Image (cartoon, rainbow, N blue to C red):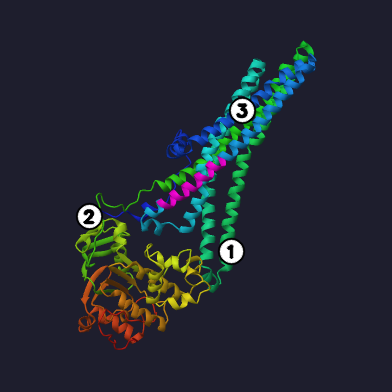
Amino acid sequence: MPGRGKRKPTKRSDLTFQPPNLSKPRAGEIVAVIRRILQENGREYRGAYIFTILCLLTVSATTALAAWIMSPVVNQIFYERRGDLIPWICAALLGAFILRGLAGYGQAVTMARIGNNLVARYQQRIFNHLMKLGVSFFNDTRSGRLAAQVNENVNGIRDLLSMTVTSTARDAVSLVGLVGVMIYQDPVLSLSSLLIGPPLIWTVTYLMRRVRRITRESVQINSRLIGAMQEATQGIAIVKAFTMEDELSRRISKLAEDAEQRSNKIARVSERLTPVSELLAGIAFASVIAYSGYRATVLGQPPGAVFSFITALTLAYDPARRLARMQVGMERALVNARMIYELLDIEPQQSDAQGAAEAKFTSGEVRFNNVSFHYVEEAPVLHDLSFVAAAGKVTAIVGASGAGKTTLVALLQRFYDVEAGTIEIDGQDISKVTKQSLRGSIAYVSQQPYLFEGTIRDNIRYGRLGATDAEIEQAARQAAADDFIRQQPQGYDTPVGENGVTLSGGQRQRVSIARAIVRQAPILLLDEATSALDNEAEARVQQALTQVMEGRTTIVIAHRLSTVVNADHIIVMEQGRLVEEGTHGSLMADPHSVYARFHRIQGVKGLGLVDDSAPIQISAPNIETQNIAGSTT
C-alpha cells in the first residue's frame, strides 16, 4: 500500500521517457503495431475504411482494365481495322478513367479525414496520459523536448495505417491484377520480367535497416532543437540580461546543422532505391521489347498481346515502386509509432489505492507520523519526521535550503508517496483516499506563480471551476488584485500571455493567491507567497491572508524567520529532520537553539536563509503582530 511499510520509491530514472533501442526490432513488429492501432481505433473507422478499400479496389480494377484493353485496341482496331468497335472501346476507356478519378478522390479525402482524426485522438490521449503520470516524470523529462518528440512522432500512427491500407488495397491489388494480365497475355515474358524481384527485395531490406537507425537519431536531434528553441524563447529576459544571445545562437546553429545532416542522410539512403529500381526496370523493359520485337518481326505474331503486356508492365512499375518505397517509409513510421507507444505504456507510479475513498476532511488537522522519504537511495531527504499541524492554526516550516521543506509539501499533496510512515488529515491516511479529492481539499500558492494561457478570470477560476464571476472578483479583492486587474485593457477578460508575461511578478503572484482563495479549501499551503510583492501590496495581501486563514489549517514554508513570527506553531528542520518546534517566544528563549541561531544570522547580517526578499509577517488570526529585534516588520 502506498505510504506504508518499507516500499522503496521508484528511482527517477525509471520514470524518464526513454524510447527503446530500435536497431533490432522483433520479427513481425510492424504487424504487431498495426494490429494494436486497429484494435484501439478500428471500430471507430470501420465504415470509412470499407469505403476507402472499395475506392482503392476500383482504382486497381480500372488500372488492370486499361492494360488488358490494349490487346483488342491494337488487334481489332489497328490490325483487323474494325471501325465499328471504336465507339465502344473509347466509351469503355473513358468510363474507366472517370470511375478511377472519382474513386481516387473519394479514398484520398476519406483517408485524410481518418488520418487527421487519428492525430487529434492520439494528441488528446497522450495529454490525458501525461496528466496521470507523477511529478517525478516531469522532473526528469524536459518539457520542450517531450513536446517536440510528441509532435514529431504522433504522425507515425496515421502514416502506418494510411500506408498499410493504401498499399494493400491499391498498390498490391493493382500489382496482382496487372501481373495477372501479363501472365494471361504472355507467361514466358512474365516469368522473365519477375526476375527483377529478388534484387529489389534485397535492396529494400538493406535500406530499411539503415533508415531505422537514422530516423531514430533524427527524431532525437529535432526534439532537442525544438526544445532548445522553446527554452530560449521562454527565458528571453535572462538570455538578454546575461547577453547569452551569441552563445545560444551557436548552440542552436549546431543542433540545426546536425538535424540538417540527419535529414539529408535519410534522403540519401531512402532515395538509393530510386536508381536501383530504375536500373532493374530498364533491364526488364529492354528485355521484353527485344524478345517481343523478335517475335513480331521474325515470327510474324500479332502485336496486340505484346502491346497489352508492355502496357501492363508499364503500369505495374508504379505500384511496384511504391510498394518498395512503402517498406522504407513504414520503417520511419514504425520508429515514430513505437516512441508514442513507449510513452503511452509508461505506467503511472502513483495510482490510487484499490478501493480508495473520497476524502472527507472537516477541520483539516495534518499529522506526519514517522515519515521517511528519498528520491534516490543514496540521498535521503526526510528522516522519521513526525509533527502535527493543528486544525485551523498556522504552522510554519523553517530551515535552511535543502532541509526538506518543499518535499514535505509535495508529500502532503501526494506528488510522491512516502517510503515509510503515514501522513494523515483528520485521521484519514492520505494514501487511502483518491488523489483528486485530496488535492481538491488543498489550496497551494507557490513562490514562482504559474499562469496558463487564457484570461485573468480563467486563471483565477482554475482554483474552482464552478466559481461564479462574483466569487472570482471577491477573491481578487481579497488578494489585492482587483485594482490592477480593472486597469487592464479588458479587465478580468484580459489575456495574460504565455505564463502571464503581460503581468509583473507581483501581479502574477496576486492572481495565484486569488486562485487559492477561490478554491475555498480547508487546508492552505503557502510557499513564500508574498515574496514577490511590494510593500503596499504585501500589507494588503497580509491582511487578506489573515482573513482567509481564519478557520483553515495553514502551513507556511518560510525562508525568512520574520515571515512567520506570529505563527501558532513553528517547525524547525535540518537535513530532513525535525530538530526543534514551538512558538517564536519559546524557541527564542534558548539562545543556543537552531532557530535562535538563524535569527541572529538574519538579524545581524540582514540575510535570509535562502533569498533576500523583503520580509513580511504572516500572522495567525486574532494574534497581535510582534516585532523581532533586529528585523524589519
SS state under label 3: helix
Q: Which mark is residue 298?
A: none
Q: Nearer the viewer, residue 631 or 363?
A: 363
**Tag 2: amino acid:** Lys
What residue is drawn where x is 66% and y is 33%?
101
Of marks 1 and 3, the one in the foreground: 3
Which residue is identified by label 3?
A: 60
Q: Residue at 29% x, 62% y: name it.
A: 411
- Nearest to N terminus: mark 1 or mark 3: 3
- Please report contact status of discs 1 and 2: CB closer than 8 Å, yes or no: no
Q: Which residue is mark 2?
A: 6
| Residue density around tag 3, few if under 14, some if 14–19, many if 20 or more, within 10 Å | many
**117 in the magenta segment:** yes
- The amino acid type found where label 1 is placed reads Ser
Residue at 48% of width from left, 76% of height from top?
486
Give residue 114's position: percent from left, percent from top.
52, 41
Give the quadrant of the C terminus.
Answer: bottom left
Q: Find disc 1 in the rendering and name its residue.
A: 249
**Above-or-below relation of 326 to 405:** above
Residue 169 falls within the magenta-colored stretch: no
Residue 562 placement: quadrant: bottom left
Q: Amino acid at mark 3?
A: Ser
